[in-house]
Amino acid sequence: MTTILRVPTEADRLTLPALLARNAEDHGDLPALSWRSPEGGDGWTTLTWREVRRETAVLAAGYAAQGVTRGRQVLMMMGNRPEHWLSDLALTHLGAVPVTVYGTAAPGQIAHIARHSGARLAVVEGARERERWEPLLADATVPLEALVVVEPAGAGSHSTYASLHAAGQRAYDEKEFEAVWRASGADDPLTVVYTSGTTGDPKAVPLTHRGVVANALALDRVVELPDHVAHICYLPFAHIAERMLGIYLPVFRASHVHLCADAGAVAATARALHPAQFFGVPRVWEKLAASVRAALSALPEEQRAAIEAAGETAREHVAFRERGEQPPAELETAYRRAKETVLDPVLSLAGFDRLVWTASASAPMPLDVVRFWAGFGIVIMDAWGLTETVGVFTTNSPSAFRLGSVGRPLEGLELKIADDGEILVRGETVFAGYLRADGTVEGALDADGWFPTGDIGRIDDDGYLWLTDRKKEMIITSTGKNVSPALVENTLKEHPLIGQALVHGDGRSYLVALLVLDAEMAPAWAAARGIDGDPATHPEVHEEIARAVEAANARLNRTEQIKRYRLLTREWGPETGELTPSLKLRRRVIRDQYGEMLDALYGQDGT
């Protein structure tokens, strides 16, 4: 177990406010929350755990003055900024239910969540968000009554966060604050997470204090971290991963959260902080790997050869650990030497030289990316879970891992594979069902307590889970063959020039693909070959992509092979709609957006 912190009461009675009170009392002078000023600069503003609890108490009084009461949902649309993080804790201390809405949510999704939640108050970041929420105040079908705007310049006629905070300072009463949070129980709702989904209205997943604490305790038994470890918090709080990693686990562990408001600044933040732990969804690890590859490609050949030789030593060392074997003394010595003299100096440039825990989740991780990082001695502990399971359900650990798998179930949790390959889960962190608009719960478990996850996978003889794809995303060709698009896409992306891929072919006789050049690697690859201008227009780049597709096809069976493809240059992202906020493909959006192009690939013109 990582934590040696005092647990203030029995585990099955713990609440988040009780843990925060523990932190203020036992670790009050330790840093809890840091952020950079929106105006920029290199310095960090930091609150200790004692200061965090005081701010939480003041804000709780401010929200109470706004009419927020126990059990009421309060909606928030803000980035990873202190007002968001502190408001979340403050609302929890009131017994209210904080709900974060994705900043990239479509107007219809925002309206659905506002209507479904019954929330009367929403806290939004600035003018852009205010303009998206204001029409709902005049919608008779939406209960929303008021907005609080964080940025004063964007508030218009609405209340500001500063005025709410000032009201809290005037109204704060210590005895009342203590009495209110102590009235919360382990089975009370802690938050509701509206799943982002790729189609249809978001579903409301209620999470309790008990479920979150149980997940934290189970994770703590397999995750070995330094005490009070720092965490770079950059994923949306609307996603269960950052809710756990950026709010709940830091409160549980009394660790130190560094808010990164701009996801594009993650790499720079890591370089500045040299963290001991780092979590990234697969696309983040892919982008980081592409950046490192691009930097390595510019090095002299002799230096590249030394790094590659050190990488082979590291991969051999990892292979022994993966098999559960102790590396031979000679290999151990060679690895330590390679790590200290060759690999760590390279990793230091990325801020990754002090890492002791690296993890990923959300989608199948490309095996070539995992093995790339293993060449630096970094073993990415891939995990798997859902919002409905309070995040992590299975994970690899330093003492037991299989590269490419998502590990084994946490203690006390069960999984099995249905006849059609779907993964079924059961255990104390699995939710009971989806929240209806009237506050009742629509049961989602079968008579034996199993929840169908919608993911397809297999369990090997050692109990490790291997993901195949999402059940609803499996391609069935016109010949009746089942194909996992993720498997084919990850095989294509093993070539460093291919940053993103979408495979298409449901109901067709063969598969086609849309390929996107990697924005980091393509310019470096072209420059190394003396190619000027836009790489996407150069014949040599197109020839290399053709060879990449041919190489991928050689590793795939006949049904999985790509017969035709189209090369794109603009990256897909959440802002343009092709990716979810957790950076997974929105396949329907991409198919609709590039429908004519995909149809043309089944025409007579070829690629």
Image (cartoon, helix red, strand yellow):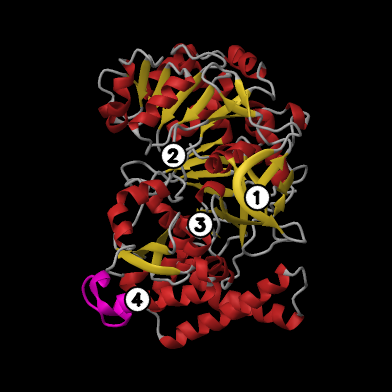
Which residue corresponds to mark 4?
525
Q: Which residues are magenta?
A: 527-543
Q: Secondary structure at mark 3?
A: helix
Q: Secondary structure at mark 1?
A: loop
Q: Secondary structure at mark 4?
A: helix
Q: Position of residue 217 (x, y in %)?
A: 72, 41
Q: Quadrant of the C terminus?
A: bottom left
Q: Position of residue 272 (x, y in %)?
A: 45, 57
Q: Earlier in the sequence, mark 1 or mark 4?
A: 1
Q: Nearer the viewer, mark 4 or mark 2?
A: 2
- Between 303 and 348, the residue placed more toward the observer is 303
**Residue occupying image coordinates x 38% and y 25%:** 111
Q: Which mark is residue 199?
A: 2
Quick check: marks 3 and 2 in contact, CB under 8 Å?
Answer: no
Q: CA distance from mark 4 to mark 2?
A: 37 Å
Q: Which mark is residue 282?
A: 3
- Between 219 and 332, the residue placed more toward the observer is 219
Q: Position of residue 105 (x, y in %)?
A: 38, 36
Q: Earlier in the sequence, mark 4 or mark 3?
A: 3
Looking at the image, residue 545 sits to the left or right of residue 400; the answer is: left
Q: Earlier in the sequence, mark 2 or mark 1?
A: 2
- Amino acid type of disc 3? Pro
**Residue occupying image coordinates x 35% and y 28%:** 150
Q: Nearer the viewer, mark 2 or mark 1?
A: 1
Q: Is residue 254 visible?
A: no
Does the stretch in magenta take in 542?
Answer: yes
